[in-house]
Image: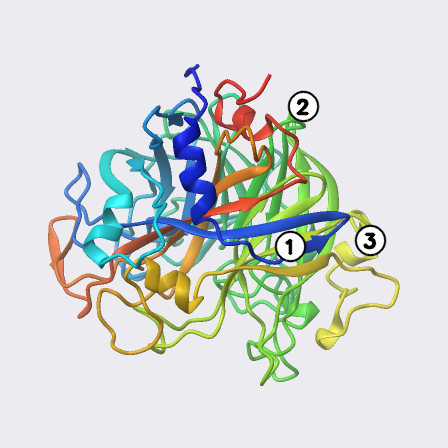
Amino acid sequence: MYSYPLLSSLVLCQLLSSARADTPVKLGGYSYVSKGPVAFGVLASNAVDSSGDTIGGIGSAMTIKRGTWSALKNGSFTGTFVMHPDSGPHGDLDKGYQTRQQEIEFVLTPYTGSSSLSLSDAKKTLSLAYRKTLLQVDVDGSKLSGVDPSGTQSSTTSSPALPLVSSSDPRLTIDAESIAQDVDGTFWMGDEYGPYIYHFNSAGQRIGVIQPPRAFLPITSQGYVDFSSSSVTGRVGGQGFEGLTMDHSTRTLYAMLQSALIQDGGVDSDGEESDTTSRYTRVVAYAVGGSSPELKGEWVVPLPRSASKGKTRPSSEILFVGNGTFLSLSRDAGGRGGNDDESSYKQIDLFSITGATNIAGSKYDDPKNPVAPGGTLASDVVPAAYASFVDLINKDSLKKFGLHNGSPNDETLIASRWEGLAIAPLCDSSNKDDYLVFAVSDNNFSTTDGVIGGVSYDEGLDVDTQFLVYRVTLPSLSRGSVETSLGISPCFS
């Protein structure tokens, strides 16, 4: 384990003086505080990995590798991100983009001043460098793909039905959207095609899979699980397990859908995807410390909606912060690389399942019994409590790091697709409940100078992968739990 020096008094004073005294957010008997951004960094859109492929889409899933986080005496921090692209560029590649993990080393030097930085100076607060790539394979050693599935492997006594590239190319295909590292060094990965939770060893080989209740699965009108056909119940296409996090003290995984299931308002009466009735999503909990994963809970979470048109703000990631409480990264599609230059919602919010109805094993796990038909929650179900927290598009916060929201569409424009979260301890003896929360964007492999499999491509726009780091007060976290999750010594005895 790394030794963990406490920050010097001077550095702590500088960090405290730069923190904004925001109004506390009350939830579940705790007071949470966002003290603003402290760092910004980018990975260039044309960066390449050791296989020669463009490093893109890595903001889909992010965690800090166990044993790598370290606080330096000068106030900086170092560590390594384990990041995971989703399905890869151009979802219709003939052979697909082989599933992989990317390791990115970083040095974080929190900015303690009050003046706004230029973009070039802002980038120095979080420097990033590619380290290595781990190509992933299935249980039989075959290469995993990310291409949209057009085939389905039927269930067996040892495996649930699985999404395949095609009937003629029976390889497993995965759309990875979230990642968590277990205490044993293995990785769990949330997927959209299933939606499933896949288990990988440290060498990159799949060693297991968790299939959620039937209500989550893509079921056809004939009653079959089919990943290549139009389903009438289950997850909406592209709205699977975007969020995955772990309570390492109990080895409990939590996975959350990006928005509501089809039968819970994910589509309208005409069968079209709906963004006005898809508010009530679900989160499931699995205990993974035993011989096989066990479903321990399932709850309904009410996602935020726009004030003007009531549009759902889907969740792209969750992060466990103790005592049944989670951070949730929700956003619209505005920003660099998005549908519009201007964004109206990008936030890291809070929700608590304490007091919510646990529907695991209930009638609602049968797709015939929606928990929110037409987007209206069943009267016998109490949803999670939800609260607004960190605003990523706050004008002053963006300006501090050389960024903006809205036109012009240039490299200083806030990115559109924020999809990853990670957490690390600050080790401030005067503020023991303060932590560093990292957010990262998914650039969707958008670059004018890309290459995959030796073939060049040009998406018409360079979208760098952006990182923002926030200082936040999270009193629901048990002290030492974040250090345990990172495999380092506790900050405080």
- The colour scheme is rainbow
Q: Nearer the viewer, residue 216 or 169?
A: 216
**Residue topped by disc 1:** 24
Q: How many angstroms separate mark 2 from mark 3 (CA)?
A: 25 Å
| Circle on res. 413 | none
Q: Is residue 104 visible?
A: no
Label 3 SS:
loop
Is there a contact, CB below 8 Å, between mark 1 and mark 3?
Answer: no
Q: Residues within 10 Å of mark 3 (few under 14, many from 20)?
A: some
Q: Amino acid at mark 1?
A: Pro
**Residue topped by disc 3:** 357
Q: Amino acid at mark 2?
A: Gly
Q: Residues within 10 Å of mark 1 (few under 14, many from 20)?
A: some
Label 1 SS:
loop
Q: Is residue 89 left or right of residue 419?
A: left
Q: How many angstroms separate mark 1 from mark 3 (CA)?
A: 26 Å
Tell me which numbered mark, 1 or 3, is placed earlier along the sequence.
1
Position of residue 274 measured from the top left corner of the image (x, y, whole percent): 58, 77
Q: Indicate the quadrant containing the C terminus: top left, top right, bottom left or bottom right.
A: top right
Snapshot quadrant of residue 99: top left
Q: Nearer the viewer, residue 60 or 172?
A: 60
**Residue topped by disc 2:** 290
Q: Amino acid at mark 3?
A: Thr
Q: Is residue 369 left or right of residue 58?
A: right
Position of residue 293 measured from the top left corner of the image (x, y, whole percent): 65, 32
